[in-house]
Image: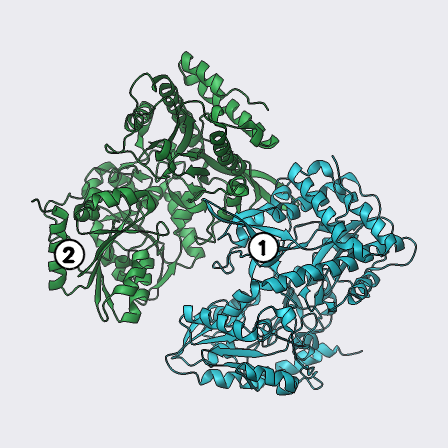
Chain colours: A green, B cyan
Amino acid sequence: MTVNIHKSRLAAIRTLMKRKRVDALIVPSSDPHLGEYVPDHWRVIRWLTGFTGSAANVVITKSFAGLWTDSRYFIQAEDQLKGSGFTLVRLKVPHTPEFIGWLGENITEGGKVAVDGRLISAVQLRMLMGAVAPHNAKVSLTADLISPLWGERPPLPDSPAYELPAEFCGESRSDKINRVREGMTANRADYQLLTAADDVMWLLNIRGNDIRYSPLLLSFALVSIQQVLLFADEEKIPGSLRSSLDKDGVVLLPYDSITSVLSHLDDGSAIMLSPSTTSAALARAVPRRVRIIEDVTVATRLKAVKNSTELNNIRQVMVRDGVALTRFFHWLEESVGRNRVTELSASEMIESLRREQEGCMGPSFSTIAAYNEHAALPHYVPDDDTDAVLENTGIFLLDSGGQYYGGTTDITRTVALGRPGENTRRDFTLALKGTISLAMARFPYGTRGYQLDVLARKALWENGMNYGHGTGHGVGCFLNVHEGPQAIGTSAAGDLKTVLEPGMVLSDEPAFYRQGEYGFRTENLLVCTDDRETDYGRFLKFETVTLCYIDSTLTEVSLLDEGELTWLNEYHENVYKSLAHFLEPGIRVWLRKKTAPLVR
Amino acid sequence: MTVNIHKSRLAAIRTLMKRKRVDALIVPSSDPHLGEYVPDHWRVIRWLTGFTGSAANVVITKSFAGLWTDSRYFIQAEDQLKGSGFTLVRLKVPHTPEFIGWLGENITEGGKVAVDGRLISAVQLRMLMGAVAPHNAKVSLTADLISPLWGERPPLPDSPAYELPAEFCGESRSDKINRVREGMTANRADYQLLTAADDVMWLLNIRGNDIRYSPLLLSFALVSIQQVLLFADEEKIPGSLRSSLDKDGVVLLPYDSITSVLSHLDDGSAIMLSPSTTSAALARAVPRRVRIIEDVTVATRLKAVKNSTELNNIRQVMVRDGVALTRFFHWLEESVGRNRVTELSASEMIESLRREQEGCMGPSFSTIAAYNEHAALPHYVPDDDTDAVLENTGIFLLDSGGQYYGGTTDITRTVALGRPGENTRRDFTLALKGTISLAMARFPYGTRGYQLDVLARKALWENGMNYGHGTGHGVGCFLNVHEGPQAIGTSAAGDLKTVLEPGMVLSDEPAFYRQGEYGFRTENLLVCTDDRETDYGRFLKFETVTLCYIDSTLTEVSLLDEGELTWLNEYHENVYKSLAHFLEPGIRVWLRKKTAPLVR
């Protein structure tokens, strides 16, 4: 009889908890920057439970050990947690800290809850304390129960950072710092704390290699009116970058010294920080007599609006990305039914075709390559156990993206591998109408993302259909594929100050999923631009920058209205004209057919 | 030389301020219930400044006396404040307390701000204190500087309250009280404070005559698990009503005793109250050891969802209202160009035609009867100075409503008095498309009002047009014409918990205004109803209950899509069928023409 290794780790943790008088231990899946992807050093949950999904929270008490995760991981978690002693708790609403509610009901009267204060946001800590307060329970942020037990823990990443050339940034470091300072002054803040690594990258025009999928150096920054402090592993900053930073008044300090620097801020000063991306440990380090201004960071707001250099680069990147995608779908059509193509081999193919393109550094997130019923799972990622062989019938969905020096891409296309039936075409087209309708939107300056969401869902809603995720997210420029503060979705719970601004990049990804059968999603990236000025104000619109044909065999033309059909034909003409020059003759002819105008 | 009476009142106030060491006095236009309409006793601003508009805030300091009001009153205020010593301050955003920002910048260091704590909400007090805190200024809620100076102040209204029969309420008082208690229990509250008079009316199935336009008795209520306390002038409660209340365990207490009762709540108990409709004085009266749960009241949430008795009554009231409106527009068409018709005489006519209808108690708000450029002012109300004579050309807009025992109506129609030109028809139709598009919406349960707003604006936005007000508000049932918590608009700043529920009544009033020329608004009331249940959840839709033809001569059929045209023709068929039976033969024939199907 073999002992499950995770079961013995759980037992060891419980022994330690008992010794330290901890009644409930919380283990989040984050790192101290609270971003989407974390380095192996911080994949504590994988080590502890065996669960390999990217987002979860673990809570351990004397009598219960639970792992909270969202629907995309239900099957996988059920499987991976077998025999580990951990129970899967299914999240009702994705990305919400439902474990806090559980603790509010299950914590021992007068008990102690422990969590590594670096791995939980200031906002979550506040919720946690509110939930356990009626039970007179205390929250300890200092007990590290993992390090003593995790013998061969992977070290923190050590690859060097580098400067991103001006041709990609479009704005100097010192100009960016000045604009952040203007924002601080407008908010009467003496300091701006940056805890999200992409904020730091954007501000200082640097990039790193610490994280998969995002070119980030794990670092913090503290901007004051006089100087900028960069907290990073000194060994990862090459001499040339160091002197360049020095020239702009950026002072390099050890990564861990951030806590100490925060704890010595002047009494009576004011610091801006984002409570959802700042850890409880850092927020607590700020002395009581320093006023904390909670808000999305000035850097996040400025970063969201791309400058003209970035936008021009993004448009060029889209051509390269479109070439890779066109070659991929041509290859797919040629290969399926002839050679063995699986979800995993298709994922490898799109990645290698992208890497052939100039300036491509790899994928911007895990490729979703999903055949038939797998496509009905919005976040499905194939693995050796689930990998399906693609055949000459059915539906194939590919949601993938690349990191290029000039920009980050994120695109979804769904194609029919055989002749789709009438219902299939109807389902596809009702979702496609959403993608087109949002792309065609024209709206006054001041409009927020939530106001436009219904445009993407109207055709589905009218037919009693819907999709259970957001419609659009912000996208970074050679940074995170998911970037704030703007978003398009049903919820207005986010940052109500954020309006759509010219220069913002957003995804446009309405979808429709039929459980056990198939899923459809057509996703393009949009750039928000000026439309016109009238007596009724300044109006904005979107430019669709993603360049890849949309499968005509899935499109039921009779369901498109006049404007939608015109949009689709013009889009296809643009795709062909933009990509044709870079394609091999055979593929060019093929793309001409794929982008031929549709008629009623 | 005559001395302006308001100037001398201002001088007297300043003398009193000096004596009481008040550096800034705030005078709001509200009463202790913070509702939309107030009795004459509380029209302090009219007495003080001469301004007769319904919404304003006055701030007086040693060197400045300002009156903040919104754009609908700019011209009127400019005129009425002449020589009064008060300066008009134009609100940038309607219904926002911009005077608080002004005080934040202009209050004397260490100064004292005074405001009658009964007339400012707990929310506004919090904002005010935040704004003046950096200047170490204090806020006093107790100084009443008005009563000593206002010699012939109108007394509080004294007309009696009455019980609304079961046939209009559809739910007994005791059942309502039980449902409020269930909501309190769910929120772990021991008390529910009701400060908005319409909440009290709904809960106790009573009505009053204290306020113009709304059948309200000025009163507060405090619901506990054991009993209900009603705070009202005892003389206004007839014996029969008193014993009926008594039977249901409702205890009558003097109106003013509310403060004292609140200040004696048990330590450790919890009270729910709405901070935007509860005065600072009442919120402050609650002892520190009582936990305050701030939320929209349970009564407001329950009241918003009409029961089937109410909905049936509303549908019947709509027939009567539609008959009055049809007679009005027939009379208008017959009279204009023949007899002298003015905005004011038209207002009187619609009011008297409504009063002829069974159960009509009068108008539900001041009638907006606006000719040509007056119609470009969304809230224009004619008076002797502005009253325009209607001629056989141009545009006439009528926004009016009635209070009936069975329900409250609110409808806007715009008609052409001559032959409208092409641009005029285009403007009207682009706004009408919004009214129709919202009426046709189908959406999943859980949808909030802000999500649907773009449906009402899309056609306008696509043409660089817009309107500067909300799209829809809740409507009471023989209660306030503006009722919360639901609304449809661009802003999600309101109550994010509120989703659209079957049984809610909302207005649907997209519009378009061309300054100096004309304005268009087509407003119907919608009832939210169930649509269907699918694999993707429960879906809802709207039923348009308002019954009045829409002017075909203004409708440019080529701008309507297939679905909109079908809706319009079906609507007209329904209007005719519902009203014809009640109309005189001549008017019936006339309405048949007005509701004839449109074709492309």
Relative image position of residue B416 (x, y in whole percent): 80, 48
Q: Which image quadrant: the N terminus of chain A?
A: top left
Height in image: B347 above or below A483? below
Q: Which residue in the rendered view is the most extreme toward the right?
A: B338
Relative image position of residue B88 (x, y in whole percent): 66, 66
Circle 2 SS class: loop
Which residue is at a point 45% across and 33% down the rendered structure image?
A522
The residue under label 2 is A145
Height in image: B511 above or below B352? above
Q: Answer whether residue B516 is visible to the viewer in this image.
A: no
Relative image position of residue B64 (x, y in whole percent): 61, 72
Circle 1 SS class: strand
Q: Chain of mark 2?
A: A
Task: Report the side of A390 relative to A547 (left or right).
Answer: left
Observer-side mark, 1 or 2, equals 1
> What amino acid does circle 2 point to?
Leu
> What amino acid does circle 1 point to?
Cys
Q: Chain of mark 1?
A: B
Image-quadrant location for residue A172: top left
Q: Which is nearer the eye, B116 or B526?
A: B526
Q: Which image quadrant: the C terminus of chain A?
A: top right
Q: Residues within 10 Å of mark 1 (few under 14, many from 20)?
A: many
Task: Report the side of A187 relative to A533 (left or right).
Answer: left
Height in image: A211 above or below A45? above
Image-quadrant location for residue A395: top left
Relative image position of residue A56 (x, y in whole percent): 27, 49
Which residue is at a point 45% across and 70% down the rendered structure image?
B182
Instruction: Find residue B424 and name its label.
Output: none
- How far apart marks 1 and 2 lie (CA) works out to 54 Å
Q: Which residue in the rendered view is the most extreme toward the left?
A: A1
Instruction: Find residue B528 and name its label.
Output: 1
